[in-house]
Amino acid sequence: MPYVLRRALLVIPTLLGISFLAFALANLAPGDPAEQVLRRTSDRQPTKAEVAEKRNELKLDRPLVGQYVAWVGRAVRGDLGVSYATRRPVVTELRHRVPYTLQLTLLAALLALAIAVPAGIVCALHRNKLFDQFARLLSLAGASMPSFWLALSLIVLFAVRLSMVPVAGRGGWNSYILPVVTLAVTPAAVLARFTRSTMLEILDDDYMRTARAKGLTEWGTVVSHGLRNALVPLLTAFSISLGHLLAGAVIVETIFVWPGVGKLALDAITERDYPMIQGFVLYAGATFAGINLLVDLAYGAIDPRIKRAGAPTVATR
Amino acid sequence: MTTADVVSAEAAIVTIPAGQPPHRTRLLAGLLRDRTAIFGLVLVAILTLAAIFAPLLASHDPNAVDVARKFLPPSREFPLGTDHLGRDVFARIVYGARLSIGSTLAASVAISFIGVLVGLIAGWFGGITDTLISRVIDILLAFPTFLLALAVTAMLGPGLRNVLVAIILAWWASYARIVRSAVLAEKDKPYIEAARACGSPSMRILLRHLLPNIVAPIVVLTTLDLGAVLLSLSGFSFLGLGVKPPTAEWGSMLSEGRTYLSRAPNMMFYPGVAIFLMVLGFNLLGDGLRDILDPRTRGGRR
């Protein structure tokens, strides 16, 4: 079987696992969502008949296995139920919100890459020099910083004191600056450290010496030979960073009142909006699985050995 | 390559070839030679001591409300100022350290204990046990840890105890995977065969022979993860899912401070500094431990 197909098929068990988790999370939770949603939407204690009717409407009265099969069947057809809180279809809500989260995470990922990879390479080339020491200190600080604290500090400085950008909300281009920067700091720090250590290992390799011996400049050697060999471990680190970005978006979106899925998920959790929570878990799991699939396929394209063997030989550290 | 392999590559960053663990004195000597590790150790020690001796350091009750002295700037009496209820921010930070550091340590110990236990079982017994455990690990590792913990919190409901359970549930899988592969790599080695030939029971071989040989990467991973666990725990409190005000805890203090951002930035600034310094300390210490225990980086700092 071709590598691409073989790898793509592996997504199915992962998706099944994710869907089972999403389903179990909401259905094993304590409390009766039917009673809860009635009480919340009417501000009074619902009668027994109303609760029974609601349970029937939400299909909460079926046995668990039956509920799961029916739920997966509906999910495959794009029906994830109706949000308890907004009374709108979960899929519609997700479709509205996902683009805003993607904007943030992709911009942050690009920013992190644009800073981290060159910085990491320069550090490796000038190991233990001033720039290296400074950059390492900075990346250490970046990796240790709570994003919520960084976000609030940036708001106080640039939005409250200097009035350069809006405090929160999504408006013009300048409303993107603080959320994107906040989100990019941790992945940039992690990736820079990782690029540096990967490059340090590669710089001593035989083919690098050969490339230098045949008269290539140091940068030429690094870019055409070093970077290419660093690509597989870097891609691994980057895919992990993307996962962290999806998670970080929950906090950043909450602080900046950004209309993305992260904020949606947190609201759903505080309101025990089970269909919405399930939708979010499915979305997050599927997105992460998709990222991993793309990364694995990219491995095959970068390093044909992986495609043939089908097994990873990624030495990351 | 599977999805989970990609995720485990993160763990592979600290994977260390199993070998004879360095002698305790060498470990200490190595740590003391490493300047950044010392700095980390000092940070962790200072903040931990501050938590333990909170009553000696803070002259005010962390929960004493006095609206007459609210939003005071830092002064001799209130080194970091007061909050919206007139409570001493400094006192709240040192008392809050108990909950923040304590719950981080508790969660980390539980994570590595469960991870090691499950990993040992899967790797040692193999067969259907291993298959089942590995599938569960695969599913759990299909999520970024924070999102998984968030999803579990969604099920259990908010509160510190539930958030701790959620973080432990979301985190043990990567440990179990590392331990499992370490067991697989070790279990056919001569020293295990020898122990088996001598008639040692499984339990004894696992605990006395195998465990000491795979403990180094686990210690490094646990130390490196302490910072991440603290960040997650305080993140949950910040989001209002973990520790709730008025209880003093770094994350919940930041959450309260958010409301008075422009009026009293000190309310959110200093608890954040505390989190930052503690995470920095954990990370430096973890880096130092890894450098000492990892033969590949020994000799020269990468």
Image (tube, rainbow, N blue to C red):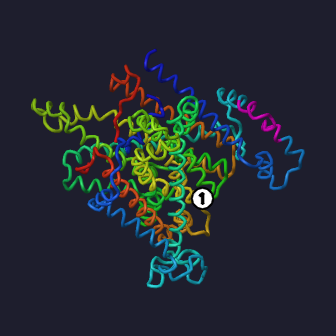
Q: Is residue B254 left or right of residue B10?
A: right
Q: Give the residue type at disc 1.
A: Gly
Q: Is residue A57 magenta?
A: yes
Chain letter, disc 1 residue: B
Give the percent coordinates (x, y) of residue B164: 58, 55
Tell me: residue B159, above or below residue B145: below
Extent of the magenta region: A54-68
- Residue A155 versus residue B49 in the image, above or below: above
Identify the residue shown where x is 52% and y is 68%.
Answer: B98
Q: Is residue B202 left or right of residue B11?
A: right
For the question of whether residue A99 can be seen, the reply is: no
Q: Quadrant of the N terminus of chain B?
A: top left
Question: What is the chief secondary structure element of the magenta stretch?
Answer: helix
Could you tell me if residue A44 is visible in this image? yes
Indicate whether A188 appears above or below A137.
above
Reply above or below: A34 against A293. Answer: below
Q: Quadrant of residue B191?
A: top left
The residue singled out by tag 1 in the image is: B242
